[in-house]
Image (tube, rainbow, N blue to C red):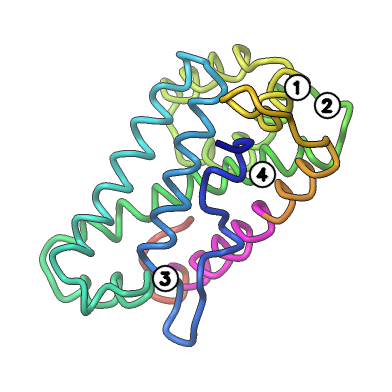
């Protein structure tokens, strides 16, 4: 095995062509986000994990039913619009909201080495996903933020080899995490533009 970020697909490695963002590679990278939340070992994040998994399933189900028309996220949403139900398009919207939350939280943590994870996630949630939740759901997420692990504990888990091998240096962890976040930011920004231009909803 290898340290965490080397066991999941990086968003930096998701192909982006003239036709758009590769659907299968994107879904694989998104599944890495689910594993990231599980790495936090915080039961309060169970609703986040459930929501991410549910929306990944909606997009994957659409892909499997129409692979030729769903090779990229842009093609998938475009071809689904002619149907009565836009299940994958709506699911993808919420998936991207969750990914935006993840990006903003971890970007905040990366930008300020002194900030605790709970504060970084609070800010990330307030600036992204929180704008789309009602009072009750915001309360659930607020509880999750307060139960975040200590910053040092989380970064230690990112660096550790679960099989007991040597951990990677903190500089390497930061470099890999920064690339992961830059790739995610690029994808979120591209799909946010697509959803706005096509009137699908706000990411």
x and y percentages locating residue 161 in the rendered image: 63, 29
Kindly identify which residue carries mark 4.
Answer: 104
Q: How many marks?
A: 4
Kindly identify which residue carries mark 2.
Answer: 115
The correct choice, above or below, for 154 with respect to 178 in the image is above
Q: Which mark is residue 29?
A: none
- State the extent of the magenta-drawn residues as a range: 180-195
Tell me the element at label 2: loop
In whole angstroms, how far apart are the C-alphas of marks 2 and 3? 34 Å
Q: Which mark is residue 22?
A: 3
In whole angstroms, how far apart are the C-alphas of marks 4 and 3? 23 Å
Q: Which mark is residue 151?
A: 1
Q: Crowding at label 4, few (<14), some or many (≥20) Cα neighbours within 10 Å?
A: many
Tell me the element at label 4: helix
Of marks 4 and 3, the one in the foreground = 3
Tell which circle, 2 or 1, labels the residue nearer the N-terminal end. 2
x and y percentages locating residue 33 in the rendered image: 50, 41
The reply to whether callout 2 and callout 1 are in contact (CB within 8 Å) is yes
Which residue sits furthest front? 165
């Amino acid at each position: 095995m290898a340290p965490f970020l080397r066991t999941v697909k990086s968003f930096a490695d998701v192909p982006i062509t003239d036709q758009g963002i590769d659907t299968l590679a994107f879904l694989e990278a998104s599944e890495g986000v689910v594993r990231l939340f599980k790495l936090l070992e915080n039961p309060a994040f169970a609703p986040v994990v459930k929501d991410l998994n549910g929306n990944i399933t909606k997009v994957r189900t659409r892909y499997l039913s129409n692979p030729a028309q769903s090779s990229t996220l842009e093609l998938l949403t475009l071809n689904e619009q002619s149907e009565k139900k836009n299940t994958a398009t709506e699911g993808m919207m919420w998936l991207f909201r969750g990914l935006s939350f993840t990006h903003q939280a971890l970007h905040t943590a990366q930008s300020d080495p002194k900030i605790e994870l709970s504060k970084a996630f609070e800010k990330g949630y307030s600036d992204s996903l929180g704008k789309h939740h009602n009072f009750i759901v915001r309360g659930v997420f607020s509880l999750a933020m307060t139960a975040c692990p200590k910053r040092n504990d989380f970064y230690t888990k990112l660096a550790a080899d679960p099989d007991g091998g040597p951990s990677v240096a903190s500089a390497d962890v930061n470099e890999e995490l920064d690339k992961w976040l830059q790739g995610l930011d690029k994808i979120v920004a591209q799909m946010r533009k697509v959803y706005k231009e096509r009137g699908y909803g706000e990411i």
